[in-house]
Amino acid sequence: MRQPLGRRCRGTARNAARSAPARTTDHSRRRWPCRAALCAVVAAVLTTAARGQTRPSTQPTDALDHLLQPIRDRHTLPALAAVVVRGDAVVASGAVGVRKWGDATPVTPNDRFHLGSCTKAMTATMIGTLVEQGRLRWETTVTDVFPELRDKIQPAYRTVTLAQLLTHRSGLPEDRRPGPVLFKLRTLQGPLLAQRAKLVELALDQEPAAEAGTKMIYSNLGYAVAGAMAERVTGQTWEDLMQARLFMPLGMTTAGFGPPGKPDAVDQPFGHRRVGERVMPIAPGPLADNPASIGPAGTVHAGLGDWARFAALHLRGARGAAKLLEPATFARLHAPPAGSDYAMGWAVVERDWAGGRALTHGGSNGLWYAVIWLAPQKELALLIATNSGDSRAALACDETAQALLQYVSEAD
């Protein structure tokens, strides 16, 4: 049985270079079908689990390897890793396979994986800290922050708000496929602050695809513009803001940007591309990710244990118990606009197995794949990642989610 959790959000942005990432995210491939029989089983399992402890004892770090290995083998993946979070605790984790296809160096549970568009929820969370401090408002417009661009951008974008950018309702065109803006971003050089300021001008010079606020259209550039707004009001790069306002407070010491590791070593997993039946490792470098200027949309990497810290933050936030942000801010981050199912970095769906609302997102730059599911009512999170980004990787992550739910049922 495939895709037990129902639809999730993933996005794509194919680059021109053959060895460059093929995807950033993909919201349009909304493969979230809910299988009725499985949902009934999972709902019963998690209802029973919710009556027990919210922080069970941590299982051995290799507790999931026996579940992951057959899935990895079946889909010919270099590596596959996953964690299960209950409340504030990682209760199970595992990592199988190799860092680089053709090299025997094994992947470890502490290795770093590229998270693609799972970055978006992190960017929105960081921006939430600026909103609480009054540096930005959800209603702040593009021209409030960049008044010098008023006559350089399409008039329709002048009143686009920060909230509309973070919920994909800015009217910017869908950008999962390469276009003129993406090609131009690859030519930008110099300080990142200057690159992102130029990105704002390029992105907002495009013809709108819809009137702002009327339609959800997945836009990676919209998230990059939101990140640039945060940069302008603070004078700091998005990368520095993420480290200071999110990663450091959460203790996410493995979190960084772009492909992890060094090109001349196998010290971290490599991303991989599949050509026919051939699995090709792509060394870390400029063509192993999307342009750095689009970082707020999808360039974070992290170890799954640290990613779990972020997941636990949002589980707590959904219960009004987190410390980083006020409950009202978490509520705003998790609430889609009327008529939409996309909040700020989260697709929001109702699922029986989750006891109601589930938050989810997937991410891929074409060389990696990652997916996160949160079930706040069950205090449960599932995090899965692989260092391959094709359709087999997505299917493997779906099957892994099913296996993790079965693991939860047997553990409880």
Image: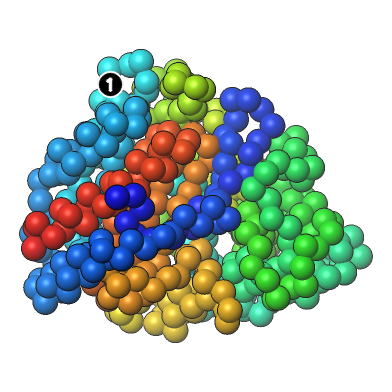
- Residue 315, position as x, y percentages in the image: 31, 70
Q: Residue at x 41, y 46 (%)?
A: 370
Q: Residue at x 11, y 77 (%)?
A: 51
- Residue 97, position as x, y percentages in the image: 27, 28
In the rendered image of this protein, does residue 354 appear above or below residue 19? below
- Residue 99, position as x, y percentages in the image: 34, 27
Q: Nearer the viewer, residue 278 or 164?
A: 278
State which quadrant residue 104 falls in: top left
Q: Please name the amino acid that badge 1 sits on.
A: Thr
Name the residue that disc number 1 marks.
105
Q: Nearer the viewer, residue 316 or 131?
A: 316
Judge from the rendering whether residue 17 lies leftward or rightward of residue 35; answer left or right.
Answer: right
Q: Quick one: quadrant of the C terminus?
A: bottom left
Q: Nearer the viewer, residue 356 or 387?
A: 356
- Label 1 neighbourhood size at 10 Å, few (<14), some (14-19), many (20+)? some
In the rendered image of this protein, does residue 373 appear above or below residue 1? below
